[in-house]
């Protein structure tokens, strides 16, 4: 049996925690502190859906402007690029520079190297900074920066799920824009929070892999 290969480590800015990238036979795995699995290249159905579902709702995808918070293994970015047109621009914000480097290296093979697409723009930093600096800029904002409203990796991520964070995301959307959030688990209170900020909300449950097993939650929010 092929041994598990450790490909790299990265410190999470603002914390003492690390992410570790492994190759386990044919699957890439990212773990927190080398123990807790966060991502697996074999289980990306919900990450695909986070890119697909909001972009498919756009009335004009040809020159769409999309912001993705969290590069991960690149599957959400790849899925969004498949849904939008040749003149579109998809910005992906990633806090950890090593994650970008991994996706430009061996890990990129898993998602067919979406960072090489000429429509892709990379912002290395906190997606919250982009939200606060943007006004009516994006047709779609898709956020997957942690485990969901119950954050796992960085407390500063909690702002994105707060009322202030949701309002900032709404201000960064164009009038007919769509806001999408990914979560490992359902959260009734978060759905209610989106509605308090003036969104019509649909909660979608998507399998992580195939049609059985673990399901993740995606909120699709449109301005009411």
Image: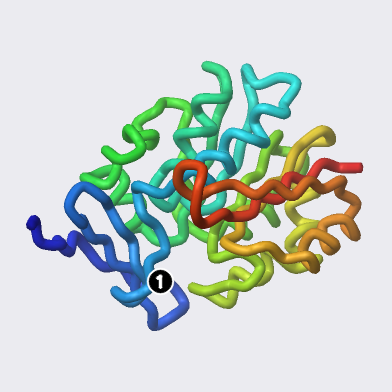
| Quadrant in the picture for residue 156 | bottom right
Quadrant of the rendering where the C terminus is positioned: top right
Left or right? Give the position of 54 relative to 50.
Answer: right
The answer to whether residue 164 is seen in the rendering is: no
Q: Position of residue 131 (x, y in %)?
A: 67, 53
Which residue is at a point 27% across and 38% down the rendered structure image? Answer: 109
- Tell me where residue 62 sits by quadrant: top right
Q: How many numbered marks, from 0 up?
A: 1
Crowding around mark 1 (Cα neighbors within 10 Å: few <14, some 14 to 19, many 20+) is some
Q: Residue 207, relative to residue 185: is it above or below?
A: above
Which quarter shows the N terminus? bottom left
Q: Residue at x 34, y 67 (%)?
A: 31
Please state the horizontal and vertical placement of residue 206, each as a whole percent of the image. Answer: 59, 47
In the image, is 62 to the left or to the right of 166? left
Residue, x 41% and y 26% (percent of image)? 118
Q: Secondary structure at mark 1?
A: loop
Residue drawn at (78%, 46%), measured in percent from left and top?
202
Q: Is residue 55 visible in this depiction of the protein?
A: yes
Q: Is residue 92 above or below residue 158?
A: above
- In the depicted structure, whether residue 11 falls above or below residue 92: below
Residue marked by disc 1: 12
Image spot of residue 203 (x, y percent): 74, 50
Q: How is the image coloured?
A: rainbow
Choose between 176 and 171: the one closer to the eye. 176
- Residue placed furthest toward the front: 212
- Compared to residue 178, the image places residue 41 above or below, namely below
Residue 30 sits in which quadrant? bottom left
Q: Point out residue 75 in the picture as x, y percentages from the top left corner.
A: 44, 41
């Amino acid at each position: 049996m092929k041994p598990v290969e450790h490909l790299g480590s990265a410190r999470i800015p603002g914390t003492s925690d690390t992410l570790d990238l492994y190759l386990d036979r044919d699957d890439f795995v990212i773990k927190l502190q080398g123990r807790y699995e966060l991502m697996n290249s074999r289980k990306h159905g919900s990450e695909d859906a986070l890119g697909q579902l909001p972009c498919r709702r756009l009335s004009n995808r040809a020159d769409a402007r999309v912001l993705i918070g969290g590069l991960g293994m690149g599957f959400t970015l790849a899925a969004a690029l498949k849904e939008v047109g040749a003149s579109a621009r998809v910005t992906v914000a990633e806090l950890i520079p090593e994650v970008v480097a991994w996706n430009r290296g061996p890990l990129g093979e898993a998602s067919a190297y979406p960072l090489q697409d000429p429509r892709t723009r990379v912002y290395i930093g906190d997606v919250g900074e982009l939200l606060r600096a943007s006004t009516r800029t994006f047709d779609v904002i898709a956020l997957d920066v942690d485990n969901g409203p119950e954050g796992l990796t960085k407390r500063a991520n909690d702002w994105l799920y707060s009322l202030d964070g949701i309002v900032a995301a709404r201000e960064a959307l164009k009038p007919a824009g769509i806001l999408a959030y990914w979560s490992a688990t359902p959260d009734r209170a978060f759905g209610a929070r989106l509605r308090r900020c003036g969104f019509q909300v649909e909660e979608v449950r998507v399998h992580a892999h195939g049609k059985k097993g673990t399901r993740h939650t995606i909120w699709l929010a449109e301005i009411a």
